[in-house]
Image (tube, rainbow, N blue to C red):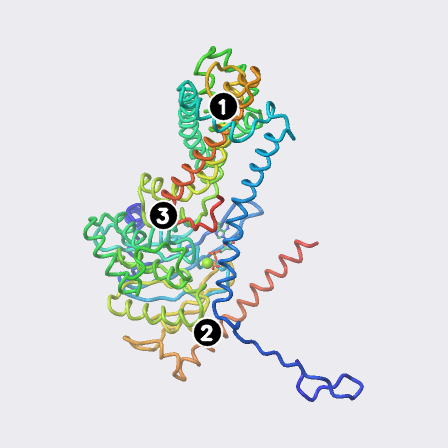
Amino acid sequence: MKGPTATDGRGTPRQDAVFVRRPLRTLDRAAAFQRRRRFLEGGLAVLIPLALFALWELGARLGWIDARMFPAPTTILRTGASLLAEGYFWSDILLTLRRVLIGAGIGIVAGFTAGALMGLNRTARAALEPMLSAVYVVPKLALLPVFITIFGLGEVPLLVIISVTVFFYIWIYTMEAFASIPEGYHEAARSLDLGPVRMFTQVLVPAALPSVFVALRVAISVSIIVIVASEFLVGTTGVGYVIFDSRRLFMNDQMYVGIVTVSLMGVVLSMIVQRIGRLVTPWVKHSRRID
Amino acid sequence: MRVHLDDVQTTADPSSGPTAKISARGIGRSFGTGPGAVHALGPLDLDIGEGEFVSLVGPSGCGKSTFVRLVAGLLPPTFGEMTVRIEGDPPAPIATVFQGFGIFPWKTVLGNVKFALAAAGVERRDANERAMRWLARLGLADFADAYPETLSGGMRQRVAIARALATEPQILLMDEPFAAIDAQMREMLQEELLTISQTERRTVVFVTHSLEEALVLADRVVVMTARPGTLLSETRVPFGRPRDTRVREGPEFGRLRVDLWTHLRDEVQAQMAGQRGGTAQATL
Ligand SMILES: Nc1ncnc2c1ncn2[C@@H]1O[C@H](COP(=O)(O)OP(=O)(O)O)[C@@H](O)[C@H]1O
Ligand SMILES: [Mg+2]
């Protein structure tokens, strides 16, 4: 800024500007604003879905929509309660859950092992990556007939398809994570003269773990999708089967119970993975987490 | 570092000075092969005595970090020879403070220091006590359970120093440890390092790009040429020990600094010219 004697070039004195910066009148106004906004956002997040449900309920009751096709939310809740009370539905839930957990468990262990090996060893990477990358792009559901041919009908092809799905997510993220550990960590570890075990468990794994958990959350969500589709295609049990069987029998309220159940399963499993992730990677700042 | 000790025993050269802790003879390193090869360092002759504090200064890219890696045994030389004498067979004879990535973000402050001690074979109970003692000494006692990411750069670098010193190494290598730290914190850390290195004398190789820092801390300042880094000049710092950072206020300090800068300026210019040539070629 020019001094007070500055002119505008035509010789007339220029008006000087003075800016005064003062604190806000109330010191905690900003804090109050933040609080109000959080409250508003939190409220909206609950209110909007509630309003939609209310609209749906109203629409079904007043006949704006065909209640046989789109039963009211309260009807779905009632059906759900009675299904759970009967007990058959529980065994479907448990079966689906079991398939997801066992399948994912195998996929996680295999994917992590392959990813770590290929991320740390260039030869292993060169040997296996082209092949795995080619298979990676195949939609895994398309392989279901192959698995049935190999393993016959029953539990095995369902477990295999979940394992394979999870494997590929975990493998690719883990490989990437291990391969991109900054050279500085390797060097610091070597300067401490760590043995191979300490090097792996205390340096390499923790460095890769945050990315592995990102993959895990994606993998769990995708396994739910895959299991529902597979149960429909080959199963005689499981929530996926219930959904499509109900549709076939025009029991739409029961179908919606199935849909809500798998959605909840996805939400709960993904939340569990997130919690475990926070527990085992406590150093990762929450603001930087992808969740 | 045991691997390193073995190297030393097989390549020990009795002709190099008997008191030298570190003795480099025509040492050098290049990276890569063929036309893309980078001749990073040397040939360089340098003796560093037992208990001596040597500062290494030179234009960036002249091979200072490479030299540190050679001493640490993190990298083998491509030519020449380096002798590092370690008394006895201690588990962690050499400790290195790196400019970045030296400490592990997944371990707490205390965890980082204890980890180094565990790797050096210190018993768990001793390790805890020793780690806490060094953290306290560097003003980090209250942050023992904090994760490094929650600390400022200056505090993180103190963690790295505490970790290096806790193993009580015979040789301490520091590669531009204060480069990324603001001026006030930097002066504090220089002060602390002076106190620590004067209480327990150990051999220190301290890389810095600050002539002032080199003069304040070291017994001897070694200036290197632009890449490939060779010895340009050596200056014995006349200030006695124990000293503190106020030595920089005397008139002699300014004179020494100017002398060193006269040596270094041409090299920095040479390095800049090299860079310009490089970019010009790249854009052609
Ligand atoms: N691992 C490496 N691979 C290839 N080139 C390297 C490697 N390490 C260092 N260099 C090169 O060697 C030269 C010296 O590097 P460095 O020792 O880090 O210099 P300084 O620490 O003095 O800045 C630089 O040109 C750098 O690019
Ligand atoms: Mg360097």
Residue lying farthest to the right in this orientation: A10
Which quarter of the rendering shows the N terminus of chain A?
bottom right
Which label lies toward us, 1 or 3? 1
Q: Chain of mark 2?
A: B
The residue sitting at 36% across, 71% down in the picture is B188
Q: Are labels 1 and 3 on one chain?
A: yes
Kind of residue sitting beneath label 3: Ala
State the residue position of label 3. A189
Tell me the distance, in whole angstroms, between the alpha carbons under discs 2 and 3: 35 Å
Q: Please tell me in which quadrant of the rendered image residue B140 appears.
A: bottom left
Query: Residue sitting at 40 percent across and 80 percent down?
Result: B253
What's the residue at 39%, 42% (across, down)?
A204
Badge 1 vs badge 2, beta-carbon distance below 8 Å: no
**Residue A145 seen in render:** yes
- Residue picked out by circle 1: A227
Which residue occupies the foreground of this view, A253 or B7?
Answer: A253
Asked which secondary structure carries label 2, the reply is: helix
- Please report whichever mark, 1 or 3, sits nearer to the chain's N-terminal start: 3
What label sits on residue B260 in the rendered view? 2
Look at the image and tell me whether residue B75 can be seen: no
| Residue count near mark 1 (Cα–Cα under 10 Å), binned few <14, some 14–19, many ≥20 | many
Q: Which element carries disc 1, helix, strand or loop?
A: helix
- Compared across the picture, whether A115 is left or right of B119 comes to right
Tell me which amino acid carries mark 1: Ile
Query: Where residue A138 sits in the image (x, y, percent)?
Result: 57, 24
The spot of residue B3 in percent (x, y) is 31, 45
- Number of the front mark, 1 or 2: 1
* Amino acid type indicated by mark 2: Leu
Point out which mark residue A194 bears.
none
Categorize mark 3 by other alpha carbons within 10 Å: few (<14), some (14-19), many (20+).
many
In the image, B12 versus B199, the foreground residue is: B199
Q: How far apart in space, not on screen, are marks 1 and 3 (Cα)?
A: 42 Å
